[in-house]
Image (spheres, rainbow, N blue to C red):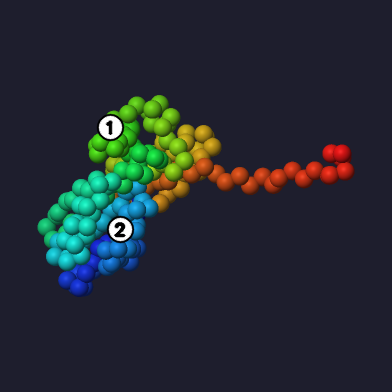
Amino acid sequence: MIHLQLCCQNCQNRPRDEELLNITCIEKVKEYIDFNMFTYISYCTICNNYEELSKELKKLKRLEIKNYHVHFFGYMNIYNLKLIKRHGFFFVDIFVDGTIEYYSYDTANMWNNVGKKIFFDSVKDESLIMIGIHEPYNGTPDYYNLVLEPIKDKGYEVNLIQNVVSCHYYIVKKPTLTKPAIKYDINIVK
């Protein structure tokens, strides 16, 4: 998952977010899309690069693109279906009353509601988990214990990638084995 801010010469007066990766080259954007399951691109609607990027992305069949506009600003959600099919992309929605819903993004380009057991059984190495947190849970560790600890208990590492709007994105990784190899005395083996 990566959040990019697309810019061109028309966007020069737009304030830039220093925490985001500001991109002007369409080829560079395509590189990021190739290696990320989910790419979130924010842009100004007068951006020349946005129009050009939209034309280029429509040619690629392995992507699902959802585009939204709010006044002069827009954002694009790009789902890399090939990577999602291989690793899995999940959304966990934690509501104000503490109820939790689990979703899986399938290659038919939609979110499917899955049960808690199916969610925890489906999470694997390189899975991407998006956690949506509503007001009372925002900033509290409850969601961490409810969702991420059971995954860690299965032997995985769970690392925060980025916060975008009201969602936290985590990547699931198999831990690297650090135990040293056992050395045998060659004289004993004879």
Q: Secondary structure at mark 1?
A: strand
Q: Amino acid at mark 1?
A: Asn
The residue depicted at 28 percent of the width and 53 percent of the height is 40
> How far from the left and from the top, in percent, is residue 77?
25, 50
Q: Nearer the viewer, residue 37 or 41?
A: 37
> How far from the left and from the top, in percent, is residue 51?
16, 61
Asked whether the viewer can see residue 93, the reply is no
Is residue 47 shown above or below 81? below
Residue density around tag 2, few if under 14, some if 14–19, many if 20 or more, within 10 Å = few
From mark 1 to mark 2, how far is it between C-alphas? 27 Å
The residue depicted at 28 percent of the width and 67 percent of the height is 25
Q: Secondary structure at mark 2?
A: helix
36 lies left or right of 184 = left
182 lies left or right of 117 = right
N-terminal of the pair, mark 1 or mark 2, is 2
Asked whether the viewer can see residue 67, the reply is yes
Q: Residue at label 2?
A: 30
The residue depicted at 29 percent of the width and 41 percent of the height is 134
Disc 1 and disc 2 in contact, CB within 8 angstroms: no
Is residue 35 shown above or below 141? below
> How far from the left and from the top, in percent, is residue 89?
35, 40
Tag of residue 112: 1
Q: Amino acid at mark 2?
A: Lys
Q: Quadrant of residue 114?
A: top left
189 lies left or right of 54 = right
Q: Nearer the viewer, residue 32 or 55?
A: 55
Q: Quadrant of residue 74?
A: bottom left
95 lies left or right of 145 = left
